[in-house]
Amino acid sequence: QTLDEMRALRDETERFMLRYKFGMDEVITKLSILREEFSQTHDYNPIEHISSRLKSLDSVIDKMRRKGIEPTFDTIRDTITDIAGVRITCSFVSDAYRIFELLTAQRDIRVLKVKDYIKEPKENGYQSLHVIVEVPVFLSTGAHPVAVEVQIRTIAMDFWASLEHKIYYKYDKQIPKELLDGLTDAAHTASELDARMERLHREVHGAPRLPHANRDIAV
Ligand code: 0O2
């Protein structure tokens, strides 16, 4: 490869990753607007915290290799939908669904995939509402749709997930059985706490409007 070719590849890679950052920025702006509007109009804030991260090119390539696909810009674009990640932490389960509804109902947002680990927690107890959205990013070359993974969860779910994540890496993905059981048990406790907090919240604020499909969440 010539030096010019190497430079061209570097520039193309930077442009490729930048689109995901812009997609992430678009989603964060949408959420920040909702958050500010809620505080203004309803004197209530359903979003506690918003965080985001861009996957490194190295982890993107590792993930492609794990999937057994040769990484090119096109195959990465088609395969990896969590290069841009946004995490929203809410106080209550009903708020998590409310934010999901408000975000996904927006006209320029296309829902690619939903995984409701709140309704159906993973075996280890992990809970969170995941949605992959596609948002248009407007560049000098026109509109480019970009996939962004949005994870919506409560403070209790987030507390559990961050500890589990640390343990997972500390034990290099081989968590001892007792610790795994302890984690699953803690996930149940977190879920019970969410249900109790939701009940108390409803007593103070009245029943929140939940999306139809999720009216039966445990409270
Ligand atoms: P990181 O470091 O947070 O980015 P895929 O990503 O599509 O290959 P899958 O199973 O379809 O895999 O995605 P899924 O189930 O929607 O989960 C992806 C992300 O959810 C993970 O990203 C984690 O952030 C989070 N997650 C899923 N399961 C667990 C869990 O059991 N514990 C914790 N703590 N987090 C979880 P990454 O890329 O694995 O990690």
Image (tube, rainbow, N blue to C red):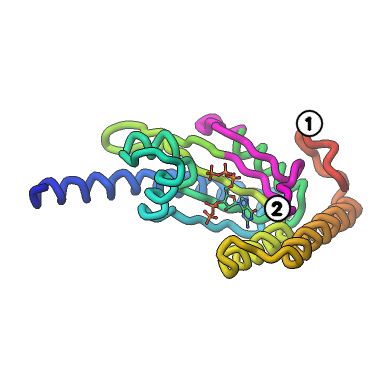
Residue projecting furthest to the bottom = 170
Q: Secondary structure at mark 2?
A: loop
Q: Which amino acid type corresponds to the residue marked 1 in the rendered image?
A: His
| Horizontal and vertical percent position of residue 83 | 44, 47
Q: Residue at x 12, y 46 (%)?
A: 5
Q: Residue at x 74, y 53 (%)?
A: 125
* Residue 136 on the magenta segment: no
Q: Viewed as shown, does residue 71 lie left or right of 79?
A: left
Question: Number of callouts in the render?
Answer: 2
Classify residue 44 by image quadrant: bottom right
Q: Is mark 2 within 8 Å of ligand 1?
A: yes
Label located before the other in sequence (1 or 2): 2
* Residue that carries the numbered disc 1 in the rendered image: 212
Mark 1, Cα crowd under 10 Å, few <14 / some 14-19 / many 20+, is few
Kindly identify the amino acid type of the residue bearing the numbered disc 2.
Answer: Tyr
At 58% from the left and 61% from the top, the residue drawn is: 173
How many residues crowd mark 2 within 10 Å: few (<14), some (14–19), many (20+)? Answer: many
Residue 36, position in %: x, y? 61, 53
Q: Residue at x 82, y 43 (%)?
A: 208
Element at label 1: helix
Residue 203 x/y as whole percent? 91, 53
As drawn, 8 above or below 89: above
Residue 45 seen in this snapshot? no
The residue pinned by badge 2 equals 126
Label ID, residue 182: none
Residue 113, compared with residue 128, is above or below; it is above
| x then y, percent, for residue 2 | 8, 48
**Which residues are drawn in magenta?**
105-131
